[in-house]
Image: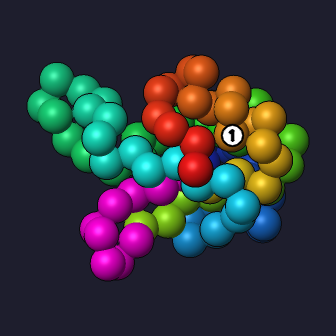
Amino acid sequence: MVIDNMPIAPDCGYDKRFKYNIPINNIRWSLDQSLGIPYFVVIWCAENCKHPWGWWFDKKTKEARMSFENRNESIFYCFKWGGTNK
């Protein structure tokens, strides 16, 4: 996958689930109070994560989640964007 000429590894991106999951539906990203995974978060992960990462949607709870294989990268994400590492 390529977003704005930035390659995203095949083991990263949409519908990829790993050990460390961060629910993000409680995070409001913009003044219009929209929910979901913003473009700038995907770009940040592509630039800063060295291990597989992704995002997915829990169909039961209708909750978006960021997901990381590496614990430290999930913690860095929480420091940058907020959220609770679960």
Q: Which residue is drawn at 68% across and 40% down?
A: 74
Q: Residue at x 81, y 47 (%)?
A: 70
Q: Can residue 38 be seen in this view?
A: yes
Furthest-front residue in view? 86
- The verdict on residue 62 being magenta is yes
**In what quadrant of the picture does the N terminus appear?**
bottom right
Region in magenta: 58-66
Q: Locate residue 83, reporting x and y percent.
A: 47, 35
Q: How many labels does the image show?
A: 1
Task: Answer with the quarter of the image where residue 15 lies.
Answer: bottom right
Q: Locate residue 31, reporting x and y percent.
A: 16, 23
Q: Locate residue 20, reporting x and y percent.
A: 67, 53
Furthest-right residue in view? 50
- The verdict on residue 68 being magenta is no
Horizontally, residue 52 falls left or right of residue 42, namely right
Tag 1: Cα neighbours inside 10 Å, few (<14), some, or many (≥20)? many
Q: Can residue 42 be seen in this view?
A: no
Question: Where does label 1 land, which residue?
Answer: 74
Nearest the eye: 85 or 47: 85
Furthest-bottom residue in view? 60
Q: Which amino acid does label 1 sit on?
A: Ser
